């Protein structure tokens, strides 16, 4: 099955990236990712979730790859006004498909009034708001900011804005599902539900209760078109993780989740008009 990775990170000079990639026996950079998954696999492209200085983001993206401009430096959200011209420059690029904010990693509620001007701008230019939700990758920060319930405020106040709840709020799954049920403009990427090396069959058997919970709350939302495959690479091996995520859905649903939904949600269908996902 062809797939599209709707949530990944590329790192340069990052101890965090090195540690994650090291656990998989690799490196956390573009070249390693492309060589391992693009050249030999069925990876059609992906969405890089930005980190670090704004001026460095979105550079040198290979064909098929797009990015969400990531505001993960405290300065950006503390003094959002000062960064608006730079943010605007990114939003004018076709490769920039949205904005990513990192509540929890930083003390920012997604429904903070100071962010609303930016959300209005995203709505008017038809780009996506991607939001970190759920557990953080390290013990720093405060979880209350990352709780998915706060997206209900944003979704209700901006019914025409597409909002992606990264990581499906895990482990706040019932709340994440409730927000999705209540707001048809909220989508979820299923990245980051596992970290480190694993084998799908063995994991699904050993962690059957967890796997069943994921299936339960996905089923509760009741619309496979609102879920996207993403890896949070270098957190996991993309091929193995693809088998895990596909395994949470029926086969006919998995085709949408692994490939087409992300193109629809991030408004990049036309770039892949010739690519038909293979059925096997
Ligand atoms: Zn991520």
Image (cartoon, grey):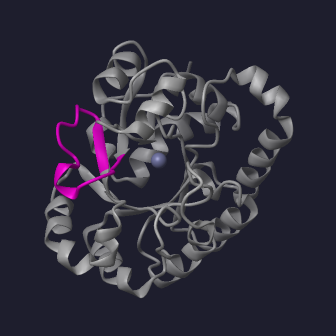
Magenta residue check for 252? no
- Residue at 30% over, 29% down: 30
Task: Please state, as top left, top right, bottom left or bottom right, where the C terminus lies in the image.
Answer: top right
Residue 270 percent coordinates (x, y): 28, 43
Q: Is residue 36 above or below residue 117?
A: above
Q: Nearer the viewer, residue 211 or 14?
A: 14
Tally of marks? 0
Residue 5 percent coordinates (x, y): 44, 36
Relative to 192, 46 lies left or right: left
- Residue at 58% over, 76% down: 150
Relative to 177, 119 lies left or right: left
Q: Nearer the viewer, residue 43 or 113?
A: 113
Q: Nearer the viewer, residue 143 or 140?
A: 140
- Residue at 44% over, 40% down: 16
- Magenta-highlighted residues: 49-67
Relative to 90, 220 lies left or right: right
Residue 1 percent coordinates (x, y): 52, 23
**Magenta stretch prevailing secondary structure:** loop
Kindly give the residue lying farthest to the bottom in the view shown: 113
Residue 12 percent coordinates (x, y): 29, 36
Residue 1 seen = no
Relative to 204, 268 lies left or right: left
- Residue at 36% over, 85% down: 114
Q: Is residue 201 above or below residue 122?
A: above
**Which quadrant of the view contains residue 181?**
bottom right
**Which quadrant of the view contains residue 28?**
top left
């Amino acid at each position: 099955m062809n797939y599209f990775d709707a949530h990944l990170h590329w790192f340069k000079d990052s101890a965090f990236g090195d540690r994650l990639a090291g656990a998989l026996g690799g490196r956390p950079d573009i070249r390693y990712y492309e060589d391992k998954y693009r050249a030999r696999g069925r990876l059609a492209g992906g969405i890089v979730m930005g980190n670090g200085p704004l001026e460095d983001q979105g550079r040198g993206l290979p064909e098929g790859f797009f990015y969400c401009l990531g505001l993960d430096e405290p300065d950006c959200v503390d003094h959002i006004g000062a960064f608006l011209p730079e943010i605007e420059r990114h939003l004018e690029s076709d490769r920039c498909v949205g904005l990513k904010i990192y509540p929890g990693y930083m003390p920012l509620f997604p429904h903070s009034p100071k962010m609303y001007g930016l959300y209005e701008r995203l709505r008017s230019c038809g780009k996506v708001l991607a939001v970190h939700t759920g557990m953080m990758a390290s013990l720093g920060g405060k979880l209350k900011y990352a709780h998915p319930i706060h997206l209900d405020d944003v979704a209700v106040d901006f019914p025409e804005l597409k909002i992606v709840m990264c990581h499906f709020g895990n482990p706040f799954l019932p709340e994440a599902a409730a927000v999705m049920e209540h707001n048809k403009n909220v989508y979820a990427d299923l990245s980051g539900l596992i970290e480190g090396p694993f084998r799908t069959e063995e994991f699904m058997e050993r962690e059957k209760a967890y796997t069943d919970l994921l299936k339960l709350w996905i089923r509760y939302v009741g619309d496979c078109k609102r879920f996207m495959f993403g890896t949070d690479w270098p957190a996991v091996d993309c091929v193995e993780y693809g088998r895990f995520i596909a395994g949470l859905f029926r086969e006919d649903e998995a085709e949408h989740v692994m490939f087409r939904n992300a193109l629809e949600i991030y408004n990049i269908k036309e770039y892949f008009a010739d690519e038909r996902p293979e059925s096997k």
